[in-house]
Image: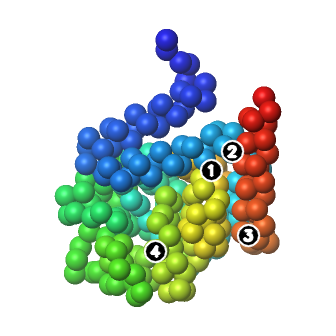
Amino acid sequence: MLIPRSHPRATSLHIREKLVSGYKSGLVVEEGLLAHGRGEMFDYLIGEKTSKYALKAIKAASETLILAKSPVISVNGNFAALCPKEIVQLAKVVDAKIEVNLFYGTEKRKRNIANVLKKNGAKEILGLDPKHSRTIPKLDSARRIVDESGIFSADVVLVPLEDGDRTIALKKFGKKIITFDLNPLSRTAQTADITIVDNVIRGMKILINYSKKNIKKKNLSKTRFDNKKNLLESINLVQKNLWRMSHA
């Protein structure tokens, strides 16, 4: 039986299709598919919709990106497969640079991701030229290698679908970190300055819309945001939904 696209399951199936297509196109690796499976579980636990706590984080993220001196959007395979159009749109709205940065990196995979971003309107993509590479200290994975004019010199980095080690290393290196993470208990979620506990496809669209409105404001200022408190609210939401499911 065909499921209407408005049905929550249809959304999940559509996302899976995009990731499988990304895998076949050389954007996503097997480990990325496994990581998505964990995220899909948590999306179900938050109700497969953007919570008011996620909206608070998105609002704070929008203000932080716009007010940043040198914001950068870090792109991995899953992010590129799911949101190529939105990545480029957000970068244009908040005047951020785009950098490809991979845990399981090959030159071919980097080029594949860059090509997808270019097809969606990106003009400049960092992280492709070894001549401009620098190293994030206290990090062992391939993600320690970053672009000198990108993540290395950024003050704010948007790192959706991130691994905990690099989030911690970037924080120690003095970066303000914004992330999308459906698991509010993950190291990334707990370490970041702003954690958006939402599906990245839903959240990126809202973040773009918020930013378009905020960029027009003459005296934009940062709203006070407590990431730990907001994460606790998201955890409570998961617990409430689990209770409802168990008593249905």
Q: Which mark is residue 228?
A: 3
Q: Are marks 2 and 3 in contact (CB under 8 Å)?
A: no
Label 2, on which residue?
Answer: 46
Whether residue 203 can be seen here: no
Q: Position of residue 229 (x, y in %)?
A: 78, 67
Residue found at x 69% / y 39%: 47
**Residue 129 position in % (x across, y down):** 23, 73
Asked whether, in this view, residue 180 is left or right of residue 125, the answer is right
Residue to which mark 4 is pinned? 166
Q: Nearer the viewer, residue 181 or 236?
A: 236
Looking at the image, tell me whether mark 4 or mark 1 is earlier in sequence order: 4
Tell me if label 3 and label 1 are in contact, CB under 8 Å: no
Quadrant housing the C terminus: top right
With 33 as the anchor, is 70 left or right in this view?
A: right
Q: Amino acid at mark 1?
A: Asp
Q: Quadrant of residue 127?
A: bottom left
Q: Amino acid at mark 2?
A: Ile
Q: Which element carries disc 1, helix, strand or loop?
A: loop
**Amino acid type for the residue under numbered disc 3:** Lys
In the displayed structure image, the side of residue 235 where residue 124 appears, left or right? left
Q: Position of residue 143 (x, y in %)?
A: 36, 72
Q: In whole angstroms, how far apart are the C-alphas of marks 4 and 1?
A: 20 Å
* Helix, strand or loop for disc 4: helix
Residue 198 has which mark?
1
Residue found at x 32% / y 38%: 21
Q: Secondary structure at mark 3?
A: helix
- Nearer the N terminus, badge 4 or badge 3? 4
Query: Please, what secondary structure does the residue beneath circle 2 have?
Result: loop
Disc 4 residue type (three-letter): Arg
